[in-house]
Amino acid sequence: MNSPTGRGKGAARPYFFLSYAHTPRVNARGVDPNHWVGRLFGDLCEAILQITDAPAGDPIGFMDRSMHQGQKWAERLSWELANCRVFVPLYSPRYFKSEACGKEWHAFTRRSVYQRRPTAERATGIVPALWVSMDHYRLPRVASELQFSHDSFGADYAAEGLYALMKIDDYRSQYATAVLRLAQRIVDVADQTVIPIGQQLDFEGQPSAFEPPEPNDRVRISVYSYREPELPPHRSPSCYGQQRTDWQPFRPPSRRPLVDDAADVARSMGFQPSVHEFEDEAEALMTAERPVAPSVLLVDRWAFLDTQRSDTVRQLDRRNLSWLSVLEPWNRDDQQCRDHERMLNELGDGVLPATRAGRQKPSLREEGSTGVPGSLDEFRGEMERAVMRASTAYEQQTTSRTVGTGTRRPRLGT
């Protein structure tokens, strides 16, 4: 059977298939966010050409640049996955949330792998690469079980990932080292294994190799805010809805509830989020002797004007729960927030003294924060850190009570 690319059975097989998660554009006119992956692909192909005797014109690697759907697109992916010699997954939080990437992994691993000679590592034909650091993210089973060491790629690579090494000038030499080591590893695996050409599968019909989050990989997100009918007279209703979870502090430009963005962040980290109004969570948070899940509380400081409700938050602050992270999103573009900033800050100091004293960034409004202070992008970064703080503390709490049953986050090479 001829391939959809016009290459028949005798065609040269590419050394590697670069599997990566396509990053969506911020807007239609924005720079292609996958440009840097394309540059890495080109650098890898050049390095492999330099260290092998591959004939000119032979395909060195394959990278899906199109994102096109349809039969021809699926046939092309299937052909490349059935013929490539090495599979290179580019690890990122987005990667393990991508159904297409999970299908690519599954399709490649349907092929048999034979070792030419014994090595210390089990032959898989898979050479993982770090696009970003994955130390704080839960890897799916198929990835955590890989016996693969990246020690020779350099300490900065392991700590930062290839994307940072490419973007930061001071890491230029470390990037060159990591690319050369990765290219050599691809060539070594291709030489040390025999992976016969596989069957060209129905790509769209393949399952994902990445299992869904385990039930215990939960994070609870609660919102302390207003329903629209509860608002004080001097607060605009434009950021509020019928539920307290409808709060949209960054409106405009964002017209979706902030808790939806928070849940998206948690899911991208491998967690299974649930969303609640603070009042539904308050009793459990106030009385629980042990946590049921890591938790994040999103606080609207305008709601501190409701003295009866804010007293519950004040009592919770006194408990100083390590597995509860508190965020105070603050939109500096909101004129009402700017006009009443001093008053609202003083309210927050009175309600959350322990929380504010215990963290370096008391809110998302600090002048010293990166990017636009109080922007939605900054919130997403703070949300990642909040989830990790809560999750780490939760694991410490649970493992201290039940020795040996704690959850361990696997790392590459372990």
Image (cartoon, grey):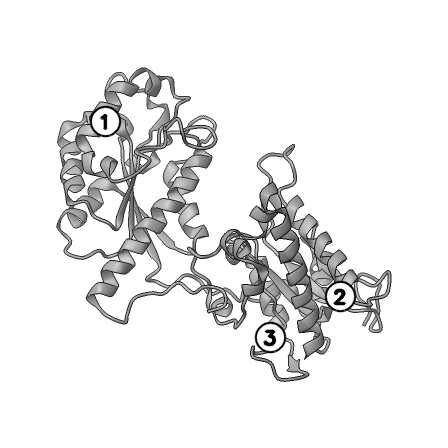
Q: Where residue 378 sits in the image (x, y, percent)? A: 43, 35
* Disc 3 from disc 1: Cα separation: 59 Å
Q: Which residue is mark 3?
A: 124
- For the point 61% across and 66% down, the residue is 127
Which residue position holds label 2? Answer: 14
**In the rendered structure, which amino acid carries the disc numbered 1?**
Glu
Earlier-in-chain disc, 2 versus 3: 2
In the image, residue 37 sits, relative to residue 342, either above or below, namely below
Q: In x, y percent, where is residue 315?
A: 13, 39
Residues under labels 2 and 3: Cα distance?
A: 17 Å
Q: Secondary structure at mark 2?
A: loop
Is residue 269 rendered to the left or right of residue 223?
Answer: right
243 vs 50: above or below: above
Label 1 element class: helix
Q: Which sits earlier in the primary sequence, circle 1 or circle 2? A: 2
Look at the image and tell me in which quarter the N terminus lies.
bottom right
The amino acid on which the numbered mark 2 sits, given as a three-letter code, is Pro
The circle on residue 203 is none
Spatial CA span between label 1 and label 2: 63 Å
Taking the spot 53% from the left edge, 67% from the top edge, the residue there is: 209
The one nearer the camera, 348 or 273, is 348
Farthest residue, direction right:
56
Which residue in the structure is indicated by mark 1?
A: 230
Q: Mark 3 or mark 1: which comes first in sequence?
A: 3
Camera-nearest label, 3 or 1: 3
